[in-house]
Image: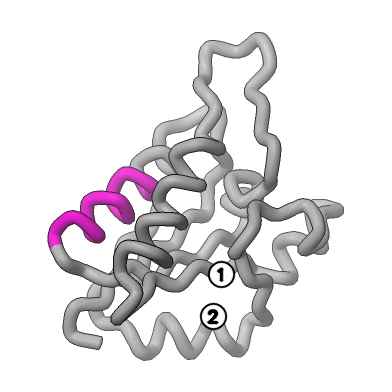
Amino acid sequence: MPNDILIVIRHGPYGGFQAAEGLRHANGALSLGFRPVVIFMDDGVYLARAGQEPGDSQWISLSETLETVIARGLYEKRDAPAEFYVDEASLCERGLSADDLVESLVPVGREKISALWADHALQMLF
């Protein structure tokens, strides 16, 4: 756990920079030898949604970046894979379910999220 970093993404993928920065920091953490533990909650669950499309906006899709970070975290770091969680309550509040998520993302309850926050001294919130 000394090389773990908790990254909490609470903002959606379009309309601000926070979600993109959260992914960038998770990817950078992997490159620097850290093991990211990523939680998507509040509007951040929209980033975890499969098949994102920003439409005619000026924003770029973050789907491919998210899938790359997940793949790197799970398959490049087999000895200590990254962890990716989605807050169940946030999903429910936004009318989404586990079926709407990118593969490999795990919905969890608030007890698990509280435990993750308590267990990780190094945290970043986006």
Q: CA distance from mark 2 to mark 1?
A: 8 Å
* 103 magenta-colored: no
Q: Quadrant of residue 4?
A: bottom left
Under circle 2, the secondary element is: helix
Q: Residue 85 has which mark?
A: 1
Work out which quarter of the rendered image holds the N terminus and state it: bottom left
Under circle 1, the secondary element is: strand
Q: Is residue 65 left or right of residue 90?
A: left
Residue at x-position 44% and y-position 83%: 116
The amino acid at mark 2 is Ile
Q: Which residue is mark 2?
A: 113
Residue at x-position 70% and y-position 54%: 101
Main SS of residues in magenta:
helix
Residue 120 in the image, given as x and y percentages of width and height:
31, 83
> Which of disc 1 and disc 2 is earlier in sequence?
1
- Badge 2 density bin: few <14, some 14–19, many ≥20, Cα 10 Å: some
Outermost residue toward the right in this view: 95
Residue 63 in the image, given as x and y percentages of width and height:
55, 38
Which segment is the magenta one?
A: 22-32
Residue at x-position 21% and y-position 68%: 34
Q: From the viewer's perspective, is residue 89 above or below residue 68? A: below
Q: Is residue 92 left or right of residue 16?
A: right
Q: Quadrant of residue 26?
A: bottom left
Residue at x-position 59% and y-position 61%: 41
Q: From the viewer's perspective, is residue 55 above or below residue 109? A: above
Residue 91 in the image, given as x and y percentages of width and height:
75, 60
The amino acid at mark 1 is Tyr
Residue 78 in the image, given as x and y percentages of width and height:
34, 74
Q: Is residue 29 left or right of residue 73?
A: left
Which of labels 2 and 1 is toward the front? 1
